[in-house]
Image (cartoon, rainbow, N blue to C red):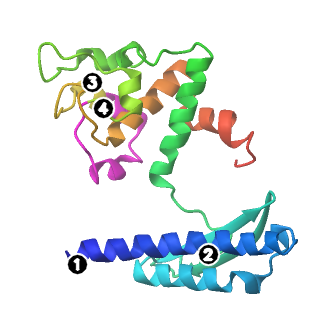
């Protein structure tokens, strides 16, 4: 109960900070000033909310910024970027974005679909041969489709926090894992169950269909055109 209450408090602090940013930009617009002209003092309340969030959530370090009219108009940093050397966070510090990469993965899969490189309703095994050997939970289970992986309905076991610990898994070891087979909680397509492995499979599909490694494909198709590389 205490953990749930603390989590709810942190969520509300996040929402409060977000609303504060919107109000700051709205006040600037109402006053006839471009949002980009808001001063650091205008964001003082928002800075305090993020500082409170940083402390309440026991986050070692964070950085937040406000983009208005296509420009970074405000940035603040808090804490340290590593607990060992205690290096302070800077506006240029790099943070692991974890499951936010799933959005890039899904968008790239849809792009390959639009180009005719794959079909969402095709079995994932059409693009990842190792899956052809998998044993499904029932004799009449439908094979996992690409669409099922995108929607987290592949029947795969929820794998947090195991999935987070596999991010540095070499490609050959990932191939071996797929060849060995995986566990299921139910037949594909029956119910939602969050799966990091499912999106790792989508990453392998991207690699196999595009003919280039996943990271290179994401950079070329999304990050570089958006100025994020």
Front tag of 2 and 1:
2
Q: Quadrant of the N terminus?
A: bottom left
Single out the residue that lies furthest toward the left: 138
Secondary structure type for disc 4: loop
Labels 2 and 1: the sequence-earlier one: 1
According to the image, label 1 marks what residue?
A: 2
Labels 4 and 3: the sequence-earlier one: 4
Q: Is residue 211 visible?
A: no
Give the CA distance from mark 2 to mark 1.
27 Å
In the depicted structure, whether residue 159 falls above or below residue 20: above
The residue positioned 57% from the left and 81% from the top of the image is: 78
According to the image, label 4 marks what residue?
A: 153
Which is more toward the observer, 57 or 69? Answer: 69
According to the image, label 2 marks what residue?
A: 20
Give the CA distance from mark 1 to mark 4.
32 Å
State the extent of the magenta-drawn residues as a range.
155-175
Q: Residues within 10 Å of mark 1 (few under 14, many from 20)?
A: few
Front tag of 1 and 3:
1
The residue positioned 31% from the left and 77% from the top of the image is: 6
Labels 3 and 2: the sequence-earlier one: 2
Q: Are discs 4 and 3 less than 8 Å apart at CB?
A: no
- 120 relative position to 116: left or right: left
Give the CA distance from mark 3 to mark 2.
50 Å
Tag on residue 93?
none
The residue positioned 56% from the left and 74% from the top of the image is: 17
Where residue 136 appears, x then y in whole percent?
17, 21
- 95 relative position to 74: left or right: left
Give the quarter of the image for residue 169: top left
Where residue 144 appears, x then y in whole percent?
30, 21
Q: Are discs 3 and 2 less than 8 Å apart at CB?
A: no
Q: Residues within 10 Å of mark 3 (few under 14, many from 20)?
A: some
Labels 1 and 4: the sequence-earlier one: 1
């Amino acid at each position: 109960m205490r953990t749930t209450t603390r989590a709810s408090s942190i969520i509300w602090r996040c929402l409060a900070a977000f609303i504060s940013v919107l109000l700051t930009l709205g006040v600037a617009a109402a006053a006839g000033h471009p949002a980009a002209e808001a001063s650091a003092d205008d964001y003082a309340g928002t800075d305090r909310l993020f500082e409170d969030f940083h402390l309440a959530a026991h986050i070692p370090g964070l950085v937040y910024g406000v983009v208005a009219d296509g420009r970074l108009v405000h940035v603040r940093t808090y804490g340290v970027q590593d607990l060992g050397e205690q290096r302070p966070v800077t506006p240029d510090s790099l943070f692991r974005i974890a499951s936010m990469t799933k959005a890039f993965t899904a968008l790239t899969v849809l792009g390959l679909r639009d180009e005719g490189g794959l079909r969402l309703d095709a079995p994932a095994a059409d693009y990842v041969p190792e899956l052809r050997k998998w044993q499904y939970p029932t004799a009449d289970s439908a094979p996992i489709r690409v669409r099922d992986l995108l929607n987290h309905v592949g029947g795969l076991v929820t794998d947090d926090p195991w999935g987070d610990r596999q991010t540095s898994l070499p490609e050959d070891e990932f191939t071996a894992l797929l060849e060995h087979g995986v566990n299921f909680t139910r037949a594909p397509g029956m119910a939602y169950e969050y799966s990091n492995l499912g999106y790792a499979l989508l990453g392998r599909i991207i690699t196999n269909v595009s003919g280039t490694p996943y990271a290179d494909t994401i950079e070329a198709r999304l990050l570089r055109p958006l100025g994020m590389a």
